[in-house]
Amino acid sequence: MTSEITRKSFHVIIVGAGLAGLSAAVSLAQKGHHVTVVEAAPGLNELGAGIQMPPNSTRILDAYGLTSRFQEKVTLPTAWNFFRYDTGEKLGATALHPEMTERYNSPYWLIHRADYQRLLHDAAKEAGATILFSSAVDAVNAHTSEVIFNDGSSLGADLIVGADGIHSKVRKAVLPNENIEPLLASSCVYRAVIPASIIASDSKIAHLLHSSDVNCWIGPQRHFISYSICRGEMYNLVMSHPGKVKDARKFGEQGEVDEMRAQYSNYHPTVKRILQHVDSCLKWQLSELPSLKSWSSTNGRVVIIGDAAHAMLPFLAQGAATAVEDGASLGECLAKAKSSLDLPIILQAFEEIRKPRCEEMKRRARYNDHIWHMSDGEEQVQRDQGMKYDIGNAPPDEKHPNQWSDIQSQPWLFGYDVISHA
């Protein structure tokens, strides 16, 4: 009788306690690995604003058993609406709930980033992960499989996961001979949050709260997105526009409210009215990473995920979702390893599963940059004509300018099951 082979449980260090790191911690800890998350910040970051959670990510959270917890914090939008920037003409819409929820058996949610991070943090700890704050990593040694902290101390593991963002230090251990720098876009984004009670008190825009829709006004070089978060208690704004920030490495700098309003001075009165209620905003530089040769070290002891591996422009609302996919895929791949000798081929498989999808996501986000921000003219008129269809009534052989409603793009984006694929 052949004895059953017991798979090895690994000690994994995850560098970074953002959405990528904490979602990977949930995945790996639930699989029985000994997970330690190290984070430079003294605690969870309460900054930020709204974030979208498409079905390809909510499906994963459901597999982790977290749906009921998230339902206490999320908003369930009914549609994504597109409007012309100046006249406010409705160009088209994508039905989200119940249509998309039923089509993909997973919902499309809206949430405050701080709530998202807190829920993942709590789930990771409950699964057995250790989370160490105020633990800034100076470097990673792939040969000894150690992280070296700023105070000179070190910590070893079987596997080190770099989830430390677009300016990743872990990435140097994967690509030691390359100097990888983010590709700065020509645009920045303002983010702001307004109490919903303030919107409700203004009769000219109170109608925005009558539904939980995502509303997006698109125009030359700019767009303006608004939606409810925190179960309708807050109203979230995302505003892309041409420009640069003073320090692209900084996680948001204080924006000038008057400058923000001036960027949208030719937008529809609804947009300008919303902006009258903004008393502060943060400003981020938009950027992405070039395609990397590899996401893992040759000895299979270090791997990068999330923005550290494939930072993308935010125009597809898939940056966080693909990071959550990474963690789930890594958990499934690592479950196949029987010893640390298997790690190189396991990480090679992980990369072959994840890299093509994430690189295509980056390309599609750039495509939206073009579609949303084109100048008025013949191409824009053709775009607007195509935008009026949703997935159920679009001409079958025409590519839809709105990827959320395209008959091929929508299932590729939202119907993907990373756990089954891995």
Image: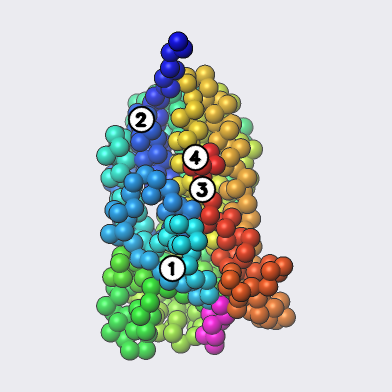
Q: Secondary structure at mark 4?
A: helix
Read off the magenta span. 83-92
Q: Earlier in the sequence, mark 4 or mark 1?
A: 1
Q: Residue at x 54, y 51 (%)?
A: 416
Q: Earlier in the sequence, mark 1 or mark 3?
A: 1
| Inter-mark Cα distance, 2 to 3 | 22 Å
| Inter-mark Cα distance, 1 to 3 | 19 Å
Q: Earlier in the sequence, mark 2 or mark 4?
A: 2
Residue that numbered label 4 is attached to: 329
User: Can residue 195 be seen by looking at this rendering?
Assistant: yes
369 left or right of 60 in image: right
Q: Residues within 10 Å of mark 4 (few under 14, many from 20)?
A: many
Q: Nearer the viewer, residue 340 or 417?
A: 417
Which kind of residue does numbered mark 4 sit on?
A: Ser
Residue that numbered label 3 is attached to: 417
Residue that numbered label 2 is attached to: 32
What percent of the width, then of the height, locates residue 373? 61, 72
Colour scheme of this structure image?
A: rainbow
Residue that numbered label 1 is attached to: 97
